[in-house]
Image (cartoon, rainbow, N blue to C red):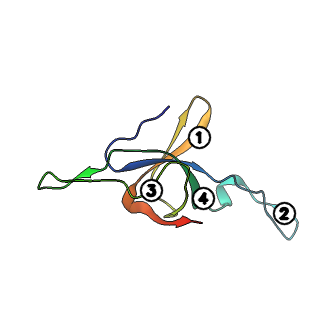
Amino acid sequence: MLKPLGDRVVLKAAEEKEETVGGIVLASNAKDKPTTGEVIAVGDGRVLDNGTKVPVSVKVGETVLFDKYAGNEVEYQGDKYLVVHDKDLVAVVD
């Protein structure tokens, strides 16, 4: 499995539902990127200038809301994931 470094978080983005506007199917590049996902793995946290380690603010299994264009998409063993910094996470969804 992927093990993120530092303050990075690996997310499995929520599945996109195919939407139609007036009966026309939108091309995949015309759809908005998903903005929620499930936390799959978290890094150890970031190290401050004084040497103190700040842990990542989310846990594996939580559903989070993230910035629309945050992170890098990666593919691992046929599955697509998003790797984002902890600062790009907006909220935890209950």
Dot in front, 2 or 1: 1
SS at circle 1: strand
Dot in front, 4 or 1: 1
Question: Tag 4 or tag 2, which sits nearer the N-term?
Answer: 2
Kind of residue at disc 4: Lys
Q: Position of residue 28 (x, y in %)?
A: 69, 53
Dot in front, 2 or 4: 4
Question: Tag 1 or tag 2, which sits nearer the N-term?
Answer: 2
SS at circle 4: loop
Q: Which residue is mark 2?
A: 24
Dot in front, 1 or 3: 3
Kind of residue at disc 2: Ile
Mark 3 surroundings within 10 Å by alpha-carbon count, few (fewer than 14), some (14 through 19), many (20 or more): some
In the image, farthest residue toward the bottom: 22
* Horizontal arrangement in the rendering, residue 90 relative to residue 19 (left or right): left
Kind of residue at disc 3: Val
Q: CA distance from mark 4 to mark 1?
A: 13 Å
Q: CA distance from mark 2 to mark 3?
A: 39 Å
Question: Tag 3 or tag 2, which sits nearer the N-term?
Answer: 2
Q: Which residue is mark 1?
A: 80
SS at circle 3: loop
Question: Tag 4 or tag 3, which sits nearer the N-term?
Answer: 4
Q: Which residue is mark 4?
A: 33
Q: CA distance from mark 2 to mark 1?
A: 27 Å
Task: In this rendered view, identify the residue nearer to me: 36 or 39.
Answer: 39
Q: Which residue is mark 3?
A: 58
> The C terminus appears in which quarter of the rendering?
bottom right
